[in-house]
Amino acid sequence: MVNSALIETTNTIFISIITYCFLELIIQAAKLIHSDFTSSTPHLNQIESIPRMSSTTKMSLEDPNAIVKVLACDGRTGEQREIGYTGTHVVGNGSFGVVFSARLIQGSVHPSGEEDVAIKKVLQDKRFKNRELAIMKLLTHPNVVDLRAYFYSTGDKPKRDEVFLNLVIEYVPETVYRASRHYSKLKQVMPMLNIKLYMYQLLRSLAYIHSLGICHRDIKPQNLLLNPMTGILKLCDFGSAKILVAGEPNVSYICSRYYRAPELIFGATNYTTNIDIWSTGCVMAELMLGQPLFPGESGIDQLVEIIKVLGTPTREQIKTMNPNYMEHKFPQIKAHPFPKVFRPRTPHDAIALVSRLLEYTPASRLTAIQAMCEPFFDELRLPDTTLTSGKPLPPLFDFTATELSVQPDLISKLVPSHAEAELRSRGINVENFEPVPLPKFSLD
């Protein structure tokens, strides 16, 4: 996309960046890694009421058809209830732990009494409450994956002293990442309607969690679950999420590299939920291109990739990203015009939205709810728009009073006229809307 001369020129950026950024990241990570991941959380052994799986009951991979029963806590109410599941298979693993698929045959909230679930099993630090669990218990939204239940289990011999947290989550069959790869392998472009649908739902989920003070900190296509039959998208994996508190420092080495906001690369520790907005812009650009927009090979190279497109940030822009940045001179690289970054005939409103999400200055980026009102999504607001399969769109405008209270002045743009009747049936009058207080949570 960017010519070879420009790529060669920007390689000189490494010298200046490494001088400060790389060392600064190491220093800040060393100072903050403890405070960020262990802030104000009680010891696990202080929570005696948490039910644990019997040490004689195991997730049997040797016999996936075995029925496993365990006393678990309800994901919403916290009440203890017995659940039973079978058909356990490993579907993913990583540094976080292992994810299994299973069939919940007892204790399901599904009308049929059974449902497919995913079970995320992570090694629990005995000293601290799991932040992912604490945050997921707070969330109820159509575009956020639902926590059905959770329980604790112990390790096999000789590691029976190990404790694992098991999150039982609703199962969603696909991801936006795999959907994008599908089109790339066919050398095709994802239909623009699909991009609109997925990005709108991602932004809606972010508008919701950001209104609660929660920053996801790992927005990427792999963490966007997708039901290809209904078009419903759900944000998942809150393992890096945190409730951001003004004045409380956070680690800057967070978020997957391709989607990492520039303020994080500059070592900022007082960042905001705007880092999720940057990541969202990267995801949208990737769906439009069929490949990552900023494919950095290292943390420092990531900034080089960003500069190739956005140009060298000004001194003022750098200070908005990290006020503590020590001045260093960077080679002056001009911005590469966004229309030349994307394919010919890419809709102007799509490019305009990406450009407003990928701003160096964090406060200049659109908020999630502002982005939802952009003209790019107008097609979704038309009453006769359907999925590419011809099926109806999933519910997109079934807002709660809390969602509409985030920025009430945008309601006229956010809610199409054909959706007002459904809102009125739930006691929400958009013509005379009274905002409700937005809840704020703390994990202290």
Image (cartoon, helix red, strand yellow):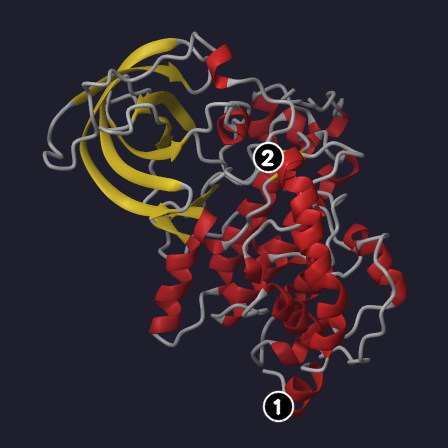
The answer to whether residue 282 is visible is yes
- Residue plotted at (72% across, 46% down): 367
Q: Amino acid at mark 1?
A: Ser
- Residue plotted at (76% across, 22% down): 434
SS type, badge 1: helix
Left or right relative to 337: residue 163: left
Outermost residue to the front: 158
Q: Along the line of sight, which residue is nearer the eye, 339 or 145?
A: 145
Task: Pinpoint residue 228: horizontal percent, then vertical percent.
Answer: 35, 50
- Residue plotted at (16% across, 31% down): 60
Check residue 37 in the rendering and tell me which mark sits there, or answer none. 2
Circle 2 packing at 10 Å, graded few (<14), some (14-19), many (20+), is: some
Task: Pinpoint residue 51: horizontal percent, then vertical percent.
Answer: 36, 12
Q: Is residue 236 above or below residue 104?
A: below
Left or right relative to 163: residue 359: right
Left or right relative to 174: residue 427: right
Query: Mark 1 highlights which residue?
Result: 4
